[in-house]
């Protein structure tokens, strides 16, 4: 379709076409007429020129508007694409944030707690037959019941600083066990692990180590095994010193000993046969060593006696589950243990109860520090004087009352007997040292 300017130039719709001029007339830009050999003659008067200019102006305006519309259309397309990209990016960010929040909630709730801990056991526990390491690995691979499902326990074998020991290491959720980095001599560095190590000791070896210490102390003139008594090779004291040196003072060492009484009986019978009826071995040094451990004579050393190897393996697996749950379990306090009358306490609660009274100095729930000799002030404190932030009276227990309540948990120990014991022995350590 022709534009208005073309129609005016061609004379379409305005005037009838003029007959062609002779070819001898040449084109001229100065006259009032325009002639061409192959075009019709179009007269261009002043009026026609004005119309032609207006038509050209309209064509330019139309082209400009069309270009503007095209630019606007392109701009809108670009803006739409950018908005769509921003929307998609916002969706992806929201999806990633939602996934991160979900992962954080799962981590904080302990959903992946069995995938966040690895049991590292010493390779010297053995890996064949009836070895403890073989039984332990099989039991851990079988898994434990956690959150209504059976979860496999991550475990790996390494050369640990303490022979035949077991420890643990926390790490991000993973399906592969994460052990410790190794130091010189292929020994694992357990400094970034759980500050708790279980050392497996057969009962006969424990009895032999205690007897070696007893014989060395007796030959050196010590009767009760004082701290400056000699530490012979193969003795229990040297073993504890070497283990604590490699682990650190604040690292807890738990001795998992099997069948102590049976080992003592076997040793007595062996000595009777060897000495032709004369008993050379005595169980008293072994009992004294056990009492020293329970009385905390060795810093951060615990003793867990078990009847046999299968029970020892079961104890290690239970400790694995306990350490996995520990970061997400509610902390047990001494008042929480004694708050419910008649409640049956667990092993962990008994350990917390004992640890709360080992020190000679204790702290009341209101923050008051009591020394062991200030018993009169402890028993004379009026509970009515204790108030909360709102000013209301609340019940509280002094350290002496808590200690008496703990003693009353013992069968046939009434309030009268408990108060007499507390007045004589203000802390559990003082009572154990007097025994």
Image (tube, grey):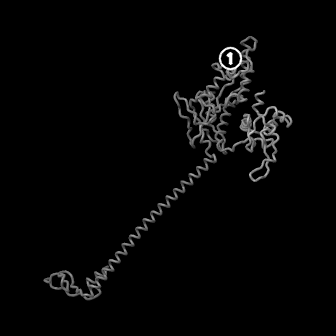
User: Which quadrant of the view contains residue 241?
Assistant: top right
Question: Looking at the picture, how far across and down is residue 281, in whole percent?
Answer: 73, 17
Pick the front one: 192 or 45? 192
- For the point 24% across and 87% down, the residue is 45
Kindly state the secondary structure of the residue where label 1 is placed.
helix
Question: Looking at the picture, how far across and down is residue 243, in whole percent?
Answer: 62, 27
Q: Is 27 placed left or right of 49 in the picture?
A: left
- For the point 76% across and 28% down, the residue is 433
User: Which quadrant of the view contains residue 401?
Assistant: top right
**374 w.r.t. 389: above or below:** above
Residue at mark 1: 216
**142 w.r.t. 60: above or below:** above
Pick the front one: 224 or 134? 224
Q: Residues within 10 Å of mark 1 (few under 14, many from 20)?
A: some
User: Which quadrant of the view contains residue 406?
Assistant: top right
- For the point 73% across and 14% down, the residue is 280
Q: Is 27 placed left or right of 392 in the picture?
A: left
């Amino acid at each position: 379709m022709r534009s208005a300017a073309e129609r005016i130039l061609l004379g379409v719709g305005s005037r009838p076409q003029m007959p062609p001029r002779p070819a001898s007339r040449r084109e001229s830009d100065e006259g009032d007429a325009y002639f061409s050999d192959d075009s019709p003659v179009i007269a261009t008067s002043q009026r026609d020129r004005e119309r032609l200019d207006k038509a050209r102006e309209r064509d330019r305006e139309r082209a400009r508007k069309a270009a503007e519309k095209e630019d606007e259309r392109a701009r809108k397309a670009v803006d739409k694409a950018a908005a769509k990209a921003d929307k998609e990016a916002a969706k992806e960010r929201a999806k990633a944030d939602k996934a991160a929040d979900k992962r954080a909630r799962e981590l904080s709730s302990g959903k992946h707690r069995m995938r966040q801990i690895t049991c590292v056991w010493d390779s010297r526990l053995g890996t064949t037959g009836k070895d403890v390491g073989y039984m332990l690995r099989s039991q851990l691979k079988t898994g434990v019941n956690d959150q209504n499902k059976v979860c496999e326990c991550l475990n790996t074998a390494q050369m640990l600083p303490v022979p035949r020991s077991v420890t643990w290491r926390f790490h991000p959720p993973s399906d592969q066990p994460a052990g410790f980095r190794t130091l010189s001599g292929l020994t694992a560095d357990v400094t970034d692990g759980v500050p708790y190590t279980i050392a497996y000791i057969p009962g006969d070896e424990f009895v032999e180590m205690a007897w070696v210490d007893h014989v060395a102390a007796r030959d050196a003139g010590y009767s009760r095994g004082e701290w400056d008594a000699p530490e012979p090779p193969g003795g229990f004291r040297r073993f504890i010193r070497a283990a604590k040196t490699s682990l650190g003072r604040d690292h807890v060492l738990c001795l998992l000993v099997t069948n102590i009484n049976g080992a003592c009986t076997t040793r007595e019978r062996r000595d009777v046969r060897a000495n032709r009826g004369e008993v050379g071995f005595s169980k008293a040094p072994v009992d004294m060593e056990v009492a020293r451990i329970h009385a905390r004579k060795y810093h951060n050393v615990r003793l867990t006696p078990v009847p046999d190897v299968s029970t020892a393996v079961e104890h290690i697996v239970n400790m694995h589950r306990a350490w996995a749950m520990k970061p997400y379990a509610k902390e047990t306090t001494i008042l929480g243990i004694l708050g419910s009358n008649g409640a049956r306490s667990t092993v962990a609660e008994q350990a917390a109860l004992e640890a709360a009274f080992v020190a000679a100095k204790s702290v009341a729930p209101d923050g008051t520090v009591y020394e062991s000799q200030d018993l009169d002030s402890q028993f004379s404190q009026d509970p009515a004087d204790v108030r909360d932030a709102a000013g209301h009276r609340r019940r509280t227990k002094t350290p002496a009352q808590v200690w008496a309540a703990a003693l009353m948990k013992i069968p046939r120990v009434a309030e009268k007997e408990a108060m007499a014991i507390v007045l004589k022995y203000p802390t559990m350590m003082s009572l154990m040292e007097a025994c």
